[in-house]
Image: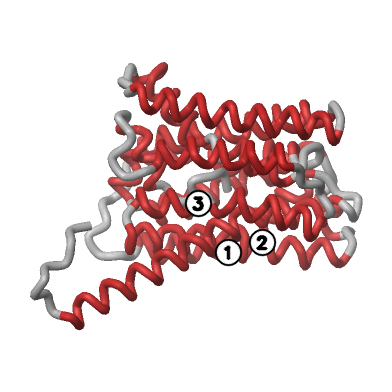
Amino acid sequence: MAAIAPHADPVTHHHEAARRRFGFALAATGAVLFSAKAILAKFQYRHGIDALDVLALRMLLSLPLFVALGIHESRRPAREPMTRRDFGLILILGVLGYYLSSLFDFWGLEYVPVSLERLILFLNPTFVLLIGVFAFGRKVARREWTAMAVSYAGVALVFVENLRVQGEHVLLGSGLVLLAALSYALYLAMSGQLIQRIGSLRLVAYAMCVSTAATVIHYLLLRDPMHLLQLPAPVYGLALINAIFCTFLPVTFTMGAVARLGAGTAAQMSVIGPVSLVFLGAWLLGEPITLVQLAGTAVVLGGVLLLTRPGANSVPVAATAQAAPGSATG
Protein backbone atom coordinates (compact mmCIF):
# COMPACT_ATOMS: atom_id res chain seq x y z
CA MET A 1 0.00 0.00 0.00
CA ALA A 2 1.31 3.45 -0.86
CA ALA A 3 2.49 5.60 2.05
CA ILE A 4 0.22 8.43 3.21
CA ALA A 5 1.55 11.80 2.02
CA PRO A 6 2.72 14.22 4.77
CA HIS A 7 -0.11 16.63 4.02
CA ALA A 8 -2.81 14.02 3.50
CA ASP A 9 -6.20 14.61 5.03
CA PRO A 10 -5.98 13.38 8.68
CA VAL A 11 -9.58 12.16 8.46
CA THR A 12 -8.69 10.00 5.46
CA HIS A 13 -5.57 8.72 7.26
CA HIS A 14 -7.63 7.82 10.34
CA HIS A 15 -10.24 6.08 8.20
CA GLU A 16 -7.56 4.04 6.40
CA ALA A 17 -5.91 3.06 9.70
CA ALA A 18 -9.26 1.94 11.13
CA ARG A 19 -9.98 -0.01 7.93
CA ARG A 20 -6.66 -1.86 8.24
CA ARG A 21 -7.19 -2.60 11.95
CA PHE A 22 -10.57 -4.10 11.11
CA GLY A 23 -8.94 -6.10 8.32
CA PHE A 24 -6.36 -7.53 10.73
CA ALA A 25 -9.14 -8.46 13.17
CA LEU A 26 -11.08 -10.22 10.39
CA ALA A 27 -7.99 -12.11 9.20
CA ALA A 28 -7.01 -13.25 12.69
CA THR A 29 -10.54 -14.31 13.59
CA GLY A 30 -10.97 -16.16 10.30
CA ALA A 31 -7.68 -18.04 10.78
CA VAL A 32 -8.58 -19.19 14.29
CA LEU A 33 -12.13 -20.19 13.29
CA PHE A 34 -10.88 -22.16 10.26
CA SER A 35 -8.50 -24.06 12.52
CA ALA A 36 -11.05 -24.65 15.29
CA LYS A 37 -13.04 -27.09 13.13
CA ALA A 38 -10.44 -29.69 14.06
CA ILE A 39 -11.24 -29.20 17.75
CA LEU A 40 -14.97 -29.62 17.08
CA ALA A 41 -14.35 -32.78 15.04
CA LYS A 42 -12.37 -34.27 17.92
CA PHE A 43 -15.27 -33.59 20.29
CA GLN A 44 -17.71 -35.17 17.84
CA TYR A 45 -15.56 -38.32 17.57
CA ARG A 46 -16.03 -38.84 21.30
CA HIS A 47 -19.70 -39.62 20.58
CA GLY A 48 -18.85 -42.60 18.37
CA ILE A 49 -19.22 -41.05 14.91
CA ASP A 50 -16.60 -40.99 12.15
CA ALA A 51 -15.21 -38.67 9.49
CA LEU A 52 -18.03 -39.26 6.98
CA ASP A 53 -20.68 -38.40 9.57
CA VAL A 54 -18.81 -35.22 10.56
CA LEU A 55 -18.39 -34.16 6.92
CA ALA A 56 -22.02 -34.88 5.96
CA LEU A 57 -23.40 -32.86 8.88
CA ARG A 58 -21.02 -29.99 8.23
CA MET A 59 -21.87 -29.74 4.54
CA LEU A 60 -25.63 -30.15 4.92
CA LEU A 61 -25.92 -27.57 7.70
CA SER A 62 -23.76 -24.98 5.90
CA LEU A 63 -25.45 -25.52 2.51
CA PRO A 64 -28.32 -23.00 3.00
CA LEU A 65 -25.79 -20.28 3.88
CA PHE A 66 -23.70 -20.91 0.77
CA VAL A 67 -26.79 -21.14 -1.45
CA ALA A 68 -27.86 -17.71 -0.16
CA LEU A 69 -24.32 -16.38 -0.71
CA GLY A 70 -24.26 -17.77 -4.27
CA ILE A 71 -27.62 -16.16 -5.11
CA HIS A 72 -26.48 -12.83 -3.65
CA GLU A 73 -23.18 -12.86 -5.56
CA SER A 74 -24.79 -13.91 -8.86
CA ARG A 75 -27.17 -10.92 -8.70
CA ARG A 76 -24.40 -8.36 -8.38
CA PRO A 77 -24.30 -5.91 -11.31
CA ALA A 78 -21.72 -6.38 -14.07
CA ARG A 79 -21.30 -10.09 -13.34
CA GLU A 80 -20.01 -12.04 -16.34
CA PRO A 81 -22.33 -14.84 -17.50
CA MET A 82 -20.95 -18.29 -16.78
CA THR A 83 -20.07 -20.63 -19.63
CA ARG A 84 -20.47 -24.40 -19.84
CA ARG A 85 -16.71 -24.68 -19.29
CA ASP A 86 -17.00 -22.62 -16.10
CA PHE A 87 -19.63 -24.98 -14.72
CA GLY A 88 -17.52 -28.01 -15.63
CA LEU A 89 -14.51 -26.52 -13.84
CA ILE A 90 -16.62 -25.74 -10.78
CA LEU A 91 -17.69 -29.40 -10.66
CA ILE A 92 -14.04 -30.45 -10.58
CA LEU A 93 -13.08 -27.77 -8.05
CA GLY A 94 -16.00 -28.62 -5.77
CA VAL A 95 -14.94 -32.27 -5.63
CA LEU A 96 -11.26 -31.43 -5.08
CA GLY A 97 -11.46 -28.44 -2.79
CA TYR A 98 -14.26 -29.09 -0.33
CA TYR A 99 -15.19 -32.76 -0.69
CA LEU A 100 -11.99 -34.77 -1.03
CA SER A 101 -9.81 -32.39 0.97
CA SER A 102 -12.34 -32.19 3.82
CA LEU A 103 -12.94 -35.95 3.79
CA PHE A 104 -9.21 -36.74 4.00
CA ASP A 105 -8.77 -34.04 6.64
CA PHE A 106 -11.52 -35.30 8.96
CA TRP A 107 -10.40 -38.88 8.39
CA GLY A 108 -6.83 -37.97 9.32
CA LEU A 109 -8.05 -36.22 12.47
CA GLU A 110 -9.16 -39.62 13.77
CA TYR A 111 -5.45 -40.46 14.12
CA VAL A 112 -3.40 -37.27 14.63
CA PRO A 113 -3.50 -34.36 17.10
CA VAL A 114 -5.01 -31.11 15.88
CA SER A 115 -1.69 -29.25 16.11
CA LEU A 116 -0.01 -31.64 13.62
CA GLU A 117 -3.07 -31.63 11.32
CA ARG A 118 -3.08 -27.86 10.96
CA LEU A 119 0.68 -27.73 10.51
CA ILE A 120 0.55 -30.20 7.59
CA LEU A 121 -2.34 -28.29 6.00
CA PHE A 122 -0.29 -25.13 6.33
CA LEU A 123 2.05 -26.51 3.66
CA ASN A 124 -0.53 -25.55 1.00
CA PRO A 125 1.57 -22.67 -0.42
CA THR A 126 4.51 -25.04 -0.95
CA PHE A 127 2.28 -27.59 -2.73
CA VAL A 128 0.84 -24.92 -5.01
CA LEU A 129 4.36 -23.79 -5.81
CA LEU A 130 5.40 -27.36 -6.68
CA ILE A 131 2.31 -27.85 -8.85
CA GLY A 132 3.34 -24.73 -10.74
CA VAL A 133 6.80 -26.21 -11.31
CA PHE A 134 5.80 -29.69 -12.46
CA ALA A 135 2.47 -29.00 -14.19
CA PHE A 136 3.05 -25.55 -15.70
CA GLY A 137 6.85 -25.34 -16.00
CA ARG A 138 7.02 -22.24 -13.81
CA LYS A 139 10.34 -20.97 -12.44
CA VAL A 140 11.05 -20.88 -8.70
CA ALA A 141 13.74 -18.69 -7.18
CA ARG A 142 16.34 -20.07 -4.81
CA ARG A 143 14.76 -18.35 -1.80
CA GLU A 144 11.47 -20.18 -2.47
CA TRP A 145 13.26 -23.55 -2.52
CA THR A 146 14.94 -22.58 0.75
CA ALA A 147 11.63 -21.60 2.31
CA MET A 148 10.05 -24.89 1.24
CA ALA A 149 12.97 -26.87 2.65
CA VAL A 150 12.63 -25.03 5.96
CA SER A 151 8.87 -25.70 6.08
CA TYR A 152 9.22 -29.41 5.38
CA ALA A 153 12.03 -29.74 7.92
CA GLY A 154 9.75 -28.22 10.56
CA VAL A 155 6.89 -30.59 9.74
CA ALA A 156 9.29 -33.56 9.83
CA LEU A 157 10.48 -32.45 13.27
CA VAL A 158 6.93 -32.23 14.64
CA PHE A 159 5.93 -35.48 12.92
CA VAL A 160 8.81 -37.46 14.46
CA GLU A 161 8.02 -36.02 17.88
CA ASN A 162 4.33 -36.95 17.56
CA LEU A 163 5.33 -40.42 16.37
CA ARG A 164 7.44 -40.80 19.50
CA VAL A 165 4.75 -39.49 21.85
CA GLN A 166 1.57 -40.95 20.31
CA GLY A 167 2.51 -44.06 18.33
CA GLU A 168 2.47 -45.38 14.78
CA HIS A 169 -1.16 -44.41 14.02
CA VAL A 170 0.23 -40.91 13.50
CA LEU A 171 1.79 -42.16 10.24
CA LEU A 172 -1.61 -43.06 8.72
CA GLY A 173 -3.26 -39.88 9.94
CA SER A 174 -0.45 -37.68 8.64
CA GLY A 175 -0.69 -39.36 5.23
CA LEU A 176 -4.41 -38.66 5.06
CA VAL A 177 -3.97 -35.01 6.06
CA LEU A 178 -1.19 -34.72 3.48
CA LEU A 179 -3.67 -35.93 0.82
CA ALA A 180 -6.11 -33.28 2.08
CA ALA A 181 -3.47 -30.58 1.66
CA LEU A 182 -2.55 -31.82 -1.82
CA SER A 183 -6.20 -31.92 -2.91
CA TYR A 184 -6.78 -28.36 -1.72
CA ALA A 185 -3.56 -27.21 -3.41
CA LEU A 186 -4.89 -28.59 -6.72
CA TYR A 187 -8.10 -26.64 -6.08
CA LEU A 188 -6.10 -23.44 -5.57
CA ALA A 189 -3.88 -24.01 -8.59
CA MET A 190 -6.86 -24.60 -10.89
CA SER A 191 -9.09 -21.82 -9.59
CA GLY A 192 -7.02 -18.73 -10.44
CA GLN A 193 -8.56 -17.65 -13.74
CA LEU A 194 -12.06 -18.61 -12.62
CA ILE A 195 -11.73 -16.46 -9.49
CA GLN A 196 -10.83 -13.49 -11.69
CA ARG A 197 -13.83 -14.12 -13.96
CA ILE A 198 -16.65 -14.84 -11.50
CA GLY A 199 -15.32 -13.66 -8.12
CA SER A 200 -13.97 -15.59 -5.15
CA LEU A 201 -17.13 -15.62 -3.03
CA ARG A 202 -19.25 -16.73 -5.97
CA LEU A 203 -16.79 -19.52 -6.72
CA VAL A 204 -16.62 -20.78 -3.14
CA ALA A 205 -20.42 -20.72 -2.84
CA TYR A 206 -20.90 -22.78 -6.01
CA ALA A 207 -18.02 -25.13 -5.13
CA MET A 208 -19.51 -25.78 -1.69
CA CYS A 209 -22.83 -26.73 -3.29
CA VAL A 210 -21.03 -29.23 -5.54
CA SER A 211 -19.09 -30.58 -2.57
CA THR A 212 -22.29 -31.06 -0.59
CA ALA A 213 -23.81 -33.05 -3.48
CA ALA A 214 -20.67 -35.24 -3.69
CA THR A 215 -20.78 -35.83 0.07
CA VAL A 216 -24.47 -36.79 -0.01
CA ILE A 217 -23.87 -39.24 -2.88
CA HIS A 218 -20.95 -40.78 -0.96
CA TYR A 219 -23.07 -41.11 2.16
CA LEU A 220 -26.03 -42.66 0.35
CA LEU A 221 -23.76 -45.25 -1.29
CA LEU A 222 -22.39 -46.42 2.05
CA ARG A 223 -25.03 -45.77 4.70
CA ASP A 224 -28.67 -45.43 5.50
CA PRO A 225 -29.43 -41.67 5.57
CA MET A 226 -31.64 -42.23 8.61
CA HIS A 227 -28.42 -42.79 10.56
CA LEU A 228 -27.81 -39.03 10.44
CA LEU A 229 -31.07 -38.48 12.33
CA GLN A 230 -30.20 -40.90 15.12
CA LEU A 231 -26.95 -39.41 16.44
CA PRO A 232 -26.45 -38.12 19.99
CA ALA A 233 -27.86 -34.63 20.57
CA PRO A 234 -24.46 -32.95 21.28
CA VAL A 235 -23.23 -34.01 17.83
CA TYR A 236 -25.81 -31.78 16.13
CA GLY A 237 -24.90 -28.77 18.25
CA LEU A 238 -21.22 -29.20 17.47
CA ALA A 239 -22.01 -29.70 13.77
CA LEU A 240 -24.04 -26.49 13.66
CA ILE A 241 -21.19 -24.56 15.27
CA ASN A 242 -18.82 -26.12 12.74
CA ALA A 243 -21.06 -25.19 9.80
CA ILE A 244 -21.57 -21.56 10.82
CA PHE A 245 -18.50 -20.50 12.77
CA CYS A 246 -15.79 -22.75 11.27
CA THR A 247 -17.00 -22.98 7.66
CA PHE A 248 -19.18 -20.10 6.47
CA LEU A 249 -17.97 -17.19 8.61
CA PRO A 250 -14.23 -17.78 8.07
CA VAL A 251 -14.75 -17.63 4.30
CA THR A 252 -16.46 -14.25 4.50
CA PHE A 253 -14.03 -12.94 7.14
CA THR A 254 -10.99 -13.97 5.09
CA MET A 255 -12.26 -12.33 1.92
CA GLY A 256 -13.15 -9.19 3.89
CA ALA A 257 -9.57 -9.12 5.17
CA VAL A 258 -8.20 -9.55 1.63
CA ALA A 259 -10.28 -6.56 0.50
CA ARG A 260 -8.85 -4.38 3.30
CA LEU A 261 -5.26 -5.61 3.57
CA GLY A 262 -4.41 -7.27 0.27
CA ALA A 263 -3.90 -10.97 -0.34
CA GLY A 264 -0.30 -11.14 0.86
CA THR A 265 -0.88 -9.57 4.27
CA ALA A 266 -4.09 -11.56 4.81
CA ALA A 267 -2.21 -14.77 3.98
CA GLN A 268 0.49 -13.95 6.51
CA MET A 269 -2.14 -13.52 9.23
CA SER A 270 -3.17 -17.14 8.72
CA VAL A 271 -0.11 -18.20 10.74
CA ILE A 272 -2.26 -17.56 13.80
CA GLY A 273 -4.30 -20.68 13.00
CA PRO A 274 -1.63 -23.36 13.57
CA VAL A 275 -0.21 -21.50 16.58
CA SER A 276 -3.65 -21.23 18.19
CA LEU A 277 -4.28 -24.96 17.72
CA VAL A 278 -1.13 -25.95 19.57
CA PHE A 279 -2.51 -24.31 22.70
CA LEU A 280 -6.23 -24.95 22.09
CA GLY A 281 -5.49 -28.66 21.59
CA ALA A 282 -3.62 -28.78 24.89
CA TRP A 283 -6.27 -26.81 26.75
CA LEU A 284 -9.48 -28.34 25.39
CA LEU A 285 -8.34 -31.84 24.37
CA GLY A 286 -5.45 -32.51 26.71
CA GLU A 287 -2.98 -33.03 23.84
CA PRO A 288 0.66 -32.90 24.95
CA ILE A 289 2.93 -29.98 24.07
CA THR A 290 6.70 -30.52 23.93
CA LEU A 291 9.55 -28.13 23.24
CA VAL A 292 10.34 -30.05 20.04
CA GLN A 293 6.76 -29.52 18.79
CA LEU A 294 6.94 -25.80 19.54
CA ALA A 295 10.30 -25.50 17.79
CA GLY A 296 9.03 -27.39 14.74
CA THR A 297 5.92 -25.23 14.58
CA ALA A 298 8.05 -22.07 14.67
CA VAL A 299 10.26 -23.42 11.85
CA VAL A 300 7.25 -24.24 9.63
CA LEU A 301 5.64 -20.86 10.18
CA GLY A 302 8.91 -19.12 9.38
CA GLY A 303 9.22 -20.98 6.09
CA VAL A 304 5.64 -20.30 5.07
CA LEU A 305 5.97 -16.61 5.95
CA LEU A 306 8.90 -16.41 3.52
CA LEU A 307 6.64 -17.81 0.79
CA THR A 308 3.58 -15.66 1.52
CA ARG A 309 5.15 -12.26 2.11
CA PRO A 310 4.23 -9.68 -0.57
CA GLY A 311 6.37 -10.05 -3.68
CA ALA A 312 8.05 -13.25 -2.50
CA ASN A 313 6.53 -15.69 -4.95
CA SER A 314 8.07 -16.05 -8.37
CA VAL A 315 5.34 -18.45 -9.52
CA PRO A 316 2.07 -16.71 -10.48
CA VAL A 317 -0.05 -19.69 -9.45
CA ALA A 318 1.21 -19.30 -5.87
CA ALA A 319 -0.09 -15.76 -5.77
CA THR A 320 -3.47 -17.19 -6.70
CA ALA A 321 -3.33 -19.36 -3.60
CA GLN A 322 -2.93 -16.26 -1.46
CA ALA A 323 -5.96 -14.62 -2.98
CA ALA A 324 -8.24 -17.61 -2.67
CA PRO A 325 -10.57 -17.89 0.31
CA GLY A 326 -8.67 -19.47 3.13
CA SER A 327 -5.01 -20.33 3.00
CA ALA A 328 -5.62 -23.74 4.39
CA THR A 329 -8.08 -26.38 3.55
CA GLY A 330 -11.67 -25.73 4.52
Is residue 197 found left or right of 59 in the rendered image? Answer: left
Which quadrant would the N terminus be assigned to in this image?
Answer: bottom left
Residue 52 position by quadrant: top right
Q: Which residue is mark 1?
A: 64
Q: Secondary structure at mark 1?
A: helix
Instruction: Decide if residue 88 is in sight here.
Output: no
Residue under label 2, please give it.
61
Q: CA distance from mark 1 to mark 3?
A: 26 Å
Looking at the image, what colour scheme do you see? secondary structure
Left or right, 226 with respect to 152, comes to right
Residue 33 seen by the camera: yes
Residue lying at 40% horizontally and 41% vertically, measured from the top left: 308
Q: Residues within 10 Å of mark 1 (few under 14, many from 20)?
A: few
| Residue closest to the eye, 258 or 305 | 305
Q: Position of residue 185 (x, y in %)?
A: 50, 34
Could you tell me the amino acid type at mark 2? Leu
Query: Mark 3 or 2 closer to N-term?
Result: 2
**Secondary structure type for disc 3:** loop
Between disc 1 and disc 3, the foreground one is: 3
Percent of width and height locating residue 102 = 64, 42
Above or below: residue 124 compared with residue 213: above
Q: Secondary structure at mark 2?
A: helix
Q: Report the front residue among 68 and 189.
A: 189
Q: Are marks 1 and 2 in contact (CB under 8 Å)?
A: yes
Quadrant of the image occupied by residue 306: top left
Q: Amino acid at mark 1?
A: Pro
In the image, residue 68 sits, relative to residue 271, either above or below, namely below
Pointer 3 local density, CA inside 10 Å: few below 14, some 14–19, many at least 20:
many
On screen, 233 above or below 47?
A: below
State the residue at coordinates (81%, 49%): 287
Residue, disc 3 = 270
Number of numbered discs visible in the structure rendering:
3
